[in-house]
Amino acid sequence: MSPASTCITGIRELWTVGSEPGSGRTIRDAAIIIEGDRFAWVGPAAEAGSADAVVDAGGRAAIPGWVDSHTHLIFDGDRADEFAARLDGQAYAAGGINVTVNATNSASDERLRTNIRGRLRDAWLGGTTALETKTGYALSLDGELRSAELAAELYRAGNLEAVTFLGAHLVPDSPAYRDNPDAYVDLVVGEMLAAVRPHVQWMDVFCERGAFNAAQTRRVLEAGRDAGLGLRVHGNQIGPGEGVALAVEYGAASVDHCNFMSDADIDALANSDTVATVLPACDLSTRVQFAPARELLDAGATVAIASNCNPGTSYTTSMQYCVATAVLQMGLSVPEAVRAATWGGARALRREEARDGLPALGAVEVGHRADLQLLDAPSPTHLAYRPGMPLTHSVWRAGERVVA
Ligand code: NIG
């Protein structure tokens, strides 16, 4: 059991991360007091009050836990062959999703539970303290419901922050829909949505050539909105398209991928409340052009970084890898990348402020949920300076030390 209050002192460099770009504080020789599941005090160690327990950070750096706002954790099987074919020059196409659909639908509930728990454990070990995950690898009424129920178990247990219904991931490879993909959209916005609705908070759609067109995307977003769900969109991943524009038009909380962007897409995001979620590990694995995160930030858009853990395009939960890639390949500074992977993710989940009795996430601020990581480094700059190194030293999630 955690003590009632804990003072973490001896922090050489704390990046608190703030709501406005550049507004977070860097506090040297810092201390943090956690009470219950919240941060109760943050400041210079010399000014810290007393607490029931004291942890010496030993001169390490501290940042908020990662908020991973885009993952697909509910699946079985892998697609290493497809990945190897990409290394030989084959382009990524969404059709591989059906390979995972077959494997997932053949797996038992217990196997899927074990898979998801293992992926969550890996994420926590890497400093992630808040995750969204999606359905979308079943694409049948019973299968999507099963995925939603499995995710909802973890949501209710406090292990996930958000569950998203992605029945509109791909039209399944079935004779029933081959010549009539709209019949599958009917199912998604009708019976499937009604069945999963008690288990999910978000609705998502893959708006892309080879997945769902603009008219189908509108139907999905309208159905989600009418059902009272928050909206998200997979857009502009494989080529230019209408995903970003539709996400902004429908007030989606985020549009994710954002690789093939026009100036109008960037402007639209900059003048909206829709977060541009970039997925650096996916961009590397699919060998597609990087999302223009630098241009998006310069234009004034809010950018989040997420892992997109899935077996097709990004088989990793490592947010450190994503942050290092965003810095080394996408032109972000380390503070920008850390903010995008913490506060940005929280904003994409609409959890950057306290809401519906739930504490805010994504920053080390008094009253926020006590999600924190100590790095085995004197400064967070080491996240990009020493990419690939095991820099997570210890992790607190909702005030509990989950990685020692
Ligand atoms: O976010 N783009 C769509 N969905 C996943 C990939 C799905 C797959 O290929 O399995 C993504 O990259």
Image (cartoon, helix red, strand yellow):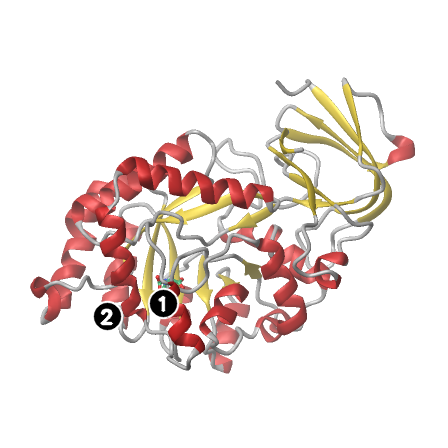
* Residue 290 versus residue 315 in the image, above or below: below
**Label 2 belongs to which residue?**
215
**311 with respect to 328 (left or right):** left
Residue 156 rendering spot, x and y as whole percentages? 40, 30
Question: How many marks on residues?
Answer: 2
Q: Look at the numbered discs 2 and 1 and tell me whether their residues touch, using CB distance below 8 Å.
A: no
**Label 1 belongs to which residue?**
81
Instruction: Point out the tag, 2 or 1, that comes first from the N-terminus.
Output: 1
Q: Residue at x 80, y 52 (%)?
A: 379
Q: Secondary structure at mark 1?
A: helix
212 and 384: which is toward the camera: 384
Nearer mark to the viewer, of 2 and 1: 1
Identify the mark at residue 272; answer none if there is no mark. none
Residue 300 rendering spot, x and y as whole percentages? 61, 68
Q: How would you rate the neighbour count of disc 1 (Cα within 10 Å): few for under 14, some for 14-19, many for 20 or more?
A: few
Residue 12 rendering spot, x and y as whole percentages? 85, 44
Q: Amino acid at mark 1?
A: Asp
Position of the C terminus, as image quadrant, is top right
The answer to whether one can see residue 282 in this image is yes
Residue 390 rendering spot, x and y as whole percentages? 67, 50
Q: Residue at x 46, y 67 (%)?
A: 257
